[in-house]
């Protein structure tokens, strides 16, 4: 990652977005997965990202979670640079220490849950708050139990992940991420690995989050109906950038771009 | 040749005393190997290409040359470079070094076997790399590593007779000394064989037990 010239040291108030991708590019060798992307998510906004595979939608989340380094541009979170840190009057690529300071404001849920198999549901939810945020065990336990209650799994709190169904594991994973009190939550195809009959229990939890928490959320999904129901905005990604975006009703009923129409009709046929 | 019980009982105490030394050498050597192996395994993961390939080369050299040669080197050659070690220290250090090369491979493959998603979950929770290793990755890797670690423990036990060549008074040396003193080898060497069996077999089942226990504790 190169030093970034001519990028602001921080984003000006007021109305600054919670997440801002500024001229972000990411490539693996000759393959460009994010192509000069400019993209904003407002505080409290729920944004769904849809698009064909290989369009870069998952990479957007992974770059934001700092699981992948970007090659060009800067990502800002809550006004401050995430991928870069200030040094003198310019931004240089962030080191691990700086990232550790920034990363706790972002939480992520994965397609394959990635719960810690050697810990119970409760321990999974206490790990971050105790080790990273420095909460006492009893504080972390209260917080974890509240969240497990919220996702409807308080009676499973002492079970290891191997004893839980996929839907239950994903709900624990959501509780684990929320226990860090992130400002931004990322959902990366969280229902894709689930059996159809348990998808509802996970989407219901996310619906509840949208209703009850003022969280900024970014969701990559193939569940078009769900995206349409709960998103403030839907972004259709194609070729590493946003081909078209808008409120779900408009994007799904009156797509303006040919590629969006093709994608949506291909999806309809699949159903 | 006839088995003499009187002689057997007479030599048993000194063989049991030597058994203590064999066990001590194994435990000390194994502790060294466990720590050394972990250091080698982690040093290969630092991301430094140079350090990684130096360690790799070193591991390959250790694994491709005889243990006996390494024992001779540390005991007879090292003093020429100013490193003078007692038989015990030279012997245990060589065992430890030799087996740390093997154990580092066990560790390395077990660490690699921890799914990438686990590392990513740690990063998403903002765990420090220390916590990531100690609390998440190593406990899971340990469950995979235990069978291999157990094999090398038994293997090391069986290699301790090599220390006899530099005069460490373990079982083999003691039995051999008894044999040459009394011109009888049947009883001492048979007893050595039995003692090794009595050590190896329980060690192997102990490791198996530990493995199952760990899997239960970890809920895997």
Image: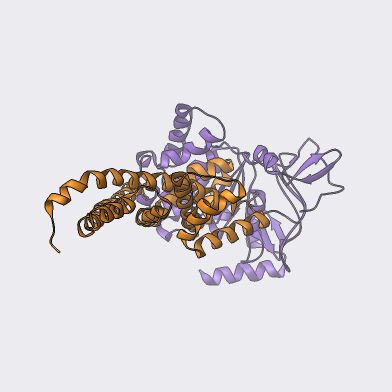
Chain colours: A purple, B orange
In the depicted view, which residue is nearer to us: A88 or B184?
A: B184
In the depicted view, which residue is nearer to us: A241 or A173?
A: A173
Picture quarter containing residue A189?
Answer: bottom right
Q: Is residue A188 left or right of residue B188?
A: right
Whether residue A3 is visible to the viewer of this picture, yes or no, is yes
* Number of callouts: 0
Q: Is residue B129 left or right of residue B174?
A: right
Where residue B169 appears, as percent x and y from the top left, is: 36, 47
Where residue B209 appears, as percent x and y from the top left, is: 29, 49
In the depicted view, which residue is nearer to us: B199 or B108?
A: B199
Q: Is residue A94 left or right of residue B53?
A: right
Q: Is residue A87 left or right of residue A51?
A: right
Whether residue A23 is visible to the viewer of this picture, yes or no, is no
Residue that appears at 86% across and 39% down: A89
Where residue B215 appears, as percent x and y from the top left, is: 35, 49
Q: Is residue A188 above or below residue A239?
A: above
Where residue A63 appears, as percent x and y from the top left, is: 67, 52
Picture quarter containing residue B185?
Answer: bottom left
Picture quarter containing residue A60?
Answer: bottom right
């Amino acid at each position: 990652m190169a030093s970034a010239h001519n990028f602001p040291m921080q984003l000006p108030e007021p109305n600054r977005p919670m997440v801002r991708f500024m001229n972000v590019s990411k490539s693996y060798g000759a393959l460009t997965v994010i192509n000069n992307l400019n993209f904003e998510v407002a505080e409290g906004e729920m944004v769904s990202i849809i698009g064909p595979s290989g369009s870069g939608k998952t990479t957007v989340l992974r770059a934001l979670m700092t699981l992948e380094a970007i090659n060009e541009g800067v990502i800002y979170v809550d006004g401050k640079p995430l991928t870069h840190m200030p040094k003198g009057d310019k931004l240089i690529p962030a080191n691990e220490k700086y990232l550790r300071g920034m990363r706790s404001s972002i939480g992520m849920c994965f397609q394959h849950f990635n719960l810690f198999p050697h810990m119970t549901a409760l321990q999974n939810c206490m790990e971050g708050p105790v080790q990273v945020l420095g909460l006492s065990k009893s504080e972390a336990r209260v917080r974890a139990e509240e969240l497990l209650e919220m996702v409807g799994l308080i009676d499973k709190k002492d079970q290891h992940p191997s004893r839980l169904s996929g839907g239950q594991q994903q709900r624990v994973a959501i509780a684990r991420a929320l226990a860090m009190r992130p400002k931004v939550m990322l959902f990366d195809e969280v229902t894709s690995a689930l059996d159809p009959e348990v998808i509802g229990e996970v989407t219901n939890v996310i619906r509840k989050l949208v209703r009850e928490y003022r969280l900024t959320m970014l969701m990559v999904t193939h569940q078009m109906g769900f995206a349409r129901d709960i998103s403030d905005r839907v972004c259709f990604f194609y070729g590493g950038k946003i081909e078209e975006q808008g409120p779900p009703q408009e994007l799904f009923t009156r797509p303006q771009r040919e590629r969006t129409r093709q994608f949506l009709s291909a999806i309809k046929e699949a159903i | 040749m006839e088995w003499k019980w009187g002689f057997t009982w007479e030599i048993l105490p000194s063989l049991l005393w030597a058994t203590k030394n064999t066990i001590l050498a194994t435990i000390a050597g194994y502790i060294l190997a466990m720590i050394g192996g972990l250091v080698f395994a982690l040093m290969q993961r630092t991301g430094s290409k140079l350090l990684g390939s130096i360690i790799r080369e070193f591991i390959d050299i250790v694994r491709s040359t005889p243990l006996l040669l390494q024992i001779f080197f540390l005991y007879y050659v090292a003093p020429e470079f100013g490193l003078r070690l007692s038989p015990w220290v030279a012997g245990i250090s060589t065992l430890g070094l030799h087996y740390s090369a093997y154990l580092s491979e066990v560790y390395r493959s077990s660490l690699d076997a921890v799914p990438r998603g686990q590392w990513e979950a740690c990063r998403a929770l903002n765990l420090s790399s220390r916590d990531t290793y100690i609390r998440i990755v190593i406990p899971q890797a340990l469950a995979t590593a235990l069978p291999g670690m157990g094999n090398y423990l038994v293997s090391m036990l069986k290699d301790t007779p090599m220390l006899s060549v530099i005069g460490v008074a373990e079982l083999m040396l003691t039995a051999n000394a008894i044999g040459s003193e009394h011109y009888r080898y049947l009883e001492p060497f048979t007893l050595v064989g039995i003692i090794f069996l009595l050590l190896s077999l329980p060690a192997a089942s102990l490791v198996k037990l530990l493995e199952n226990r760990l899997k239960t504790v970890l809920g895997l």
